[in-house]
C-alpha cells in the first residue's frame, strides 16, 4: 500500500534533509577509500607510481593491526594523548587568566600585550630548539611548547570576548548591586564564554600541531615519532597509519568538546533558524 | 523618601572651549511614591538625566540626592528598566529575576523571584531563556528583575519604545497596576505624549536641558484616552514640544 504524502512543516523537512546529508557524506568517504584502494591495486600491475610510496588503505589497516597486536600503538598513542592534553589544558587555563587580566586591568594590558604581539607571529617551530636547550629533551620542553602555542593562540579570544560585553548588561548588573568581582564573573565572563569556548576549540588544532612538531624533533615516543622513524625505513603505510591516528585522536577530543558545548550553550538555541528558507 | 535634583549641569563636549551643556542647570524634586514622566524631543537631555540619576554618568556641576544622600555611581537602591531589556541571555527568566538577590546572597531568592513572576504574570515561563520570549514578556522580566531587588525607586528609559502598539497599551496598564502595588517612586522617560498623560502624576518637559513644563495631572485612574480633559493635557504638552521644535527650525 502506498502511503499518502503527509504535509510537513519547513522545519521538519529541513531536519529530514540534514539527516539525508549525513548519509551522503559517509558515502563520499566510502567512495574515496574504494577509489584509492582500486587505484592502488591497478598500480601494483601497471607501476605508474612506485607502489612503496602509495600504500593502499588495506595496507594501512594491516600496519595498524601489527602495531596494535604488539601493544606499541597503544603506548605511543597514550604518550601523545597525555602530552597534548597536559600542554593544552595548561595553555587554556593560562590563556583564560592572562586574557582576563589584560581585559580588566589597563596595567596588565600595557605589560603583556606588547610581549604577546612580539612573540605571537613567530612560528612555534622556531622555538623548539631553544625550548629543548632550556627545558631539556624530556617531557617538559614538549608540554611547554604545546602550552605556549595554545596560550598565544587563545589569549585574543578571551580578551576580545570580555571586551565585547554589551555595555547595557554591565549597567544593569551594576544597578542590581554587583560588585566588581561579581560583575566580572557573573556578567563579563559569562557573556564572553561562547567566544572563549570558540577559542578553546580552535586552539586544539594548534596544540596538536605543536605536539607533532615536538615529537618529530627530539623524541623517541609518540605518534609524531612513529612518522619520523618510519620515514627512515620507507615505511609509508606506517607513516600514514600514525598520521591517521593523530587525526582520530584530534577528532575524538574535538567531538567531546562539541558535546560539552551543546550542553553549556543551550540558551543560544532558543531562537535560531536558517537565515533564509530555501 | 524623595529625590532632590539641584542645579545640575552635564556636558558631553566643548566647542571653542565653551561647554555644550545638555543638562543645563536643572532643578526639581521627586516626592515619595510619585510617578514622573519626562517628555521631550530627542536631544533634550531626558536620557542623560536618567543616566545621571542611575549613576552611570557623573554631573559636571550640581548634585542629585536620594533621601539626603548624594548619588555616586550606580547602586541597588535605584532599579533600572532599559529600552532594550538588557536581560542576561544565559540566565532563565527566574535566574534573571534572582540576579540582584544572588549578588547579596539572599537565601530566599527563589521564593522572592516567584512572587515577582506572579506579579508580572509570567507563570509558566520561569525556565525559558530571554531569547525565547516576545518583546512584551522580556520587558515584564526586566521590570520584575528591577523590583525583586526592592529598590527605593524605579528608573525606566523608554521601556515600551521597542514594542508594537497593542502590546504597548497592555504594558501601560500593567505598569500602572504594578506601580500601585509597590508604591515606588518612578522616573519614566518617553517621547509619547499620551503615554505620559496616561501614566504620570507629574509630567516634566525638558527643553535644552531645563524644565520647560512641570505639570501635575489631575485625572482619576485608570485614565480614559478619549476623555476631553485627557486630550486637553495632550494638546497642551504637544503645543509646547512642537512650538519649541518650530522655534529651533527657524533659528537655524
Image: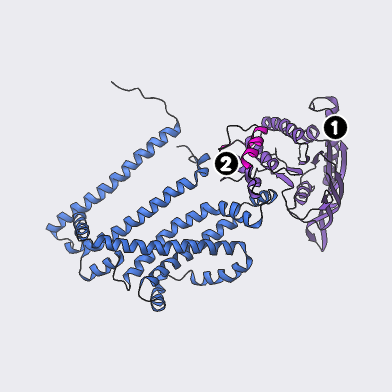
Chain colours: A blue, B purple
Q: Residues in magenta? A: B108-136
Question: Picture coordinates of residue B249 (x, y %)?
Answer: 82, 45
Query: In this view of the protein, can residue A240 be seen by the observer?
Result: no
Label 2: chain letter: B
Q: Mark 1 lies on which chain?
A: B
View extreme (left): residue: A45
On the image, the x and y values in percent for residue A119 come to 49, 72
Residue situated in front as seen by the camera: B145 or A148: B145
Q: Is mark 2 on a helix, strand or loop?
A: loop
Q: Please give the name of the residue rendered at 68% of the width and 41% of the height, measured from the top-left corner.
A: B148
Q: Mark 1 points at which residue?
A: B233
Residue where numbered disc 2 is placed: B92
Q: Is residue B195 above or below residue A97?
A: above
* Badge nearest the viewer, 2 or 1: 2
For the N terminus of chain B, the quadrant is top right
Q: In which quarter of the image is residue A57?
A: bottom left
Up the image or down, A202 lies above or below B211; here it is below
Q: Is mark 1 on a helix, strand or loop?
A: helix
Q: Are marks 2 and 1 on the same chain?
A: yes
Q: Does the magenta stretch include residue B135?
A: yes
Q: In which quarter of the image is residue B135?
A: top right
Residue B21 horizontal/vertical position (percent)? 82, 55
In the figure, is residue B130 to the left or right of A12? right
Residue at (58%, 45%) from the top-left corner? B89
Amino acid at each position: 500500500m502506498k502511503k499518502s504524502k503527509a504535509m510537513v512543516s519547513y522545519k521538519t523537512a529541513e531536519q529530514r534533509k540534514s539527516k539525508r546529508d549525513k548519509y551522503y557524506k559517509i558515502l563520499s568517504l566510502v567512495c574515496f577509500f574504494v577509489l584509492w584502494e582500486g587505484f592502488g591495486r591497478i598500480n601494483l600491475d601497471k607501476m605508474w607510481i612506485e607502489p612503496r610510496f602509495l600504500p593502499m588503505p588495506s595496507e594501512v589497516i594491516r600496519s595498524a593491526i601489527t602495531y596494535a597486536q604488539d601493544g606499541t600503538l597503544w603506548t605511543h598513542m597514550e604518550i601523545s594523548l597525555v602530552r597534548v592534553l597536559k600542554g593544552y589544558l595548561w595553555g587554556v587555563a593560562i590563556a583564560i587568566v592572562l586574557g582576563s587580566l589584560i581585559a580588566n586591568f589597563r596595567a596588565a594590558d600595557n605589560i603583556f600585550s606588547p610581549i604577546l604581539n612580539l612573540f605571537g607571529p613567530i612560528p612555534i617551530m622556531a622555538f623548539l630548539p631553544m625550548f629543548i636547550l632550556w627545558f631539556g629533551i624530556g617531557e617538559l620542553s614538549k608540554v611547554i611548547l604545546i602550552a605556549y602555542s595554545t596560550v598565544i593562540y587563545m589569549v585574543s579570544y578571551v580578551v576580545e570576548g570580555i571586551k565585547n560585553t554589551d555595555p547595557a548588561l554591565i549597567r544593569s548588573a551594576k544597578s542590581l548591586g554587583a560588585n566588581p568581582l561579581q560583575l566580572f564573573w557573573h556578567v563579563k565572563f559569562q557573556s564572553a564564554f561562547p567566544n572563549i569556548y570558540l577559542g578553546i576549540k580552535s586552539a586544539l588544532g594548534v596544540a596538536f600541531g605543536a605536539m607533532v612538531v615536538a615529537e618529530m624533533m627530539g623524541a623517541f615516543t609518540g605518534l609524531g615519532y612513529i612518522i619520523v622513524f618510519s620515514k627512515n625505513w620507507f615505511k609509508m603505510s606506517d607513516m600514514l597509519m600514525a598520521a591517521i591516528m593523530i587525526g582520530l585522536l584530534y577528532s575524538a577530543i574535538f567531538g567531546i568538546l562539541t558535546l560539552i558545548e551543546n550542553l553549556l550553550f543551550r540558551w543560544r538555541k532558543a531562537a535560531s533558524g536558517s537565515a533564509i528558507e530555501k | 523618601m524623595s529625590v532632590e535634583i539641584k542645579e545640575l549641569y552635564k556636558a558631553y563636549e566643548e566647542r571653542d572651549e565653551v561647554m555644550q551643556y545638555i543638562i543645563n542647570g536643572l532643578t526639581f524634586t521627586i516626592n515619595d511614591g510619585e510617578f514622573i514622566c519626562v517628555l521631550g524631543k530627542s536631544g533634550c537631555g531626558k536620557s542623560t538625566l536618567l543616566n545621571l540619576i542611575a549613576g552611570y554618568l557623573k554631573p559636571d556641576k550640581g548634585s542629585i540626592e536620594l533621601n539626603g544622600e548624594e548619588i555616586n555611581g550606580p547602586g541597588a537602591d535605584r532599579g533600572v528598566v532599559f529600552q532594550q531589556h538588557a536581560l542576561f541571555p544565559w540566565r532563565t527568566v527566574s535566574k534573571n529575576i534572582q540576579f540582584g538577590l544572588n549578588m547579596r546572597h539572599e537565601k530566599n531568592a527563589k521564593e522572592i523571584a516567584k512572587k515577582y513572576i506572579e506579579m508580572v504574570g509570567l507563570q509558566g515561563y520561569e525556565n525559558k531563556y530571554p531569547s525565547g520570549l516576545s518583546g512584551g514578556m522580556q520587558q515584564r522580566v526586566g521590570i520584575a528583575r528591577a523590583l525583586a531587588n526592592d529598590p527605593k525607586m524605579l528608573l525606566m528609559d523608554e521601556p515600551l519604545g521597542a514594542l508594537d502598539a497593542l502590546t504597548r497599551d497592555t504594558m501601560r496598564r500593567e505598569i500602572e497596576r504594578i506601580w500601585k502595588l509597590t508604591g515606588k517612586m518612578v522616573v519614566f522617560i518617553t517621547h509619547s505624549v499620551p503615554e505620559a498623560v496616561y501614566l504620570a502624576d507629574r509630567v516634566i518637559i525638558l527643553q535644552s536641558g531645563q524644565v520647560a513644563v512641570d505639570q501635575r495631572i489631575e485625572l482619576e485612574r485608570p485614565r480614559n484616552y478619549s476623555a476631553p480633559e485627557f486630550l486637553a493635557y495632550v494638546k497642551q504638552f504637544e503645543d509646547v514640544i512642537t512650538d519649541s521644535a518650530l522655534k529651533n527650525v527657524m533659528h537655524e
